[in-house]
Image (cartoon, grey):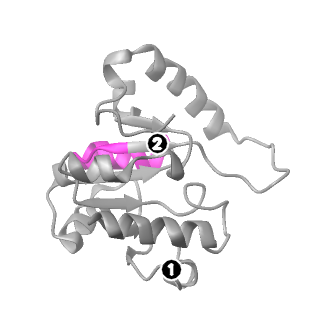
Amino acid sequence: MLKKFYPYEYAEDVFSIDYQKLYDSGIKAVIFDIDGTLVPHGDDSTEEIDSLFEKISRTGLKTLLLSNNSEERIQRFNANIKTLFIAEADKPEVKGYLRALEMLGVEKNEAVVIGDQLFTDVMGANNAGIPSVLVKFRLHPGDTKLGKKRRVEQVILKCYFMKKSRTKRLGDVCLK
């Protein structure tokens, strides 16, 4: 039952992923969540994130932002990145993930979803049949409060890490 929440890989953050290895393994597109994944909730993009998207683009990978946020929020975040996006995606519903594949022009096994939440990003990707990478969620400096959902996620992640056959299913794409 818990396997629907298990990502293919776990990375410390989006900078700890080897995008060239993803590309070399046959991945053609990366679908990113925004809040908690790329930046703390509500923040605009940073120079570091903008540079990451430039680097990813140079590898030949396509990108798309898939978010439950409003179009206005995503456009503000996307101002410098200028990548495809889907607003109000209703994650974990599958339709947003399938629409992302269509917009990117790739098959399920040619994309990867990168997000910070098991109950939206990973579960939705799994239900859509798309590999996923879970990253540790980003908080604002000084934030320490964890909600109930994050505490449940921690329990599920303990089970995930105990089940070695469920980890590292994309190969060695996470940098140490």
Q: Residue at 35%, 29% (x, y): give it.
A: 168
Position of the N terminus, as image quadrant, is top left
* Circle 1 residue: 78
Residue 87 in view, yes or no: yes
Q: Does dot 2 land on a helix, a strand or a loop?
A: strand
**Magenta stretch bounds:** 118-132
Give the side of residue 46 with respect to residue 125, left or right.
right
Residue 66 in view, yes or no: no
Q: State the image coordinates of residue 23 (x, y, percent, origin top left).
A: 25, 53
In the image, farthest residue toward the right? 142
Q: Residue at 56%, 77% (x, y): give it.
A: 77
Q: Residue at 35%, 44% (x, y): give it.
A: 132
* Circle 2 residue: 134
Query: Where 173 sits versus 104, above or below?
Result: above
The disc labelled 2 sits on which kind of residue?
Leu
Give the side of residue 51 with respect to residue 98, left or right.
right
Query: Marks 2 and 1: CB-CB under 8 Å?
Result: no
Q: State the image coordinates of residue 44 (x, y, percent, origin top left).
A: 64, 75
The disc labelled 1 sits on which kind of residue?
Asn
Question: Who is closer to the viewer here, 127 or 167?
Answer: 167
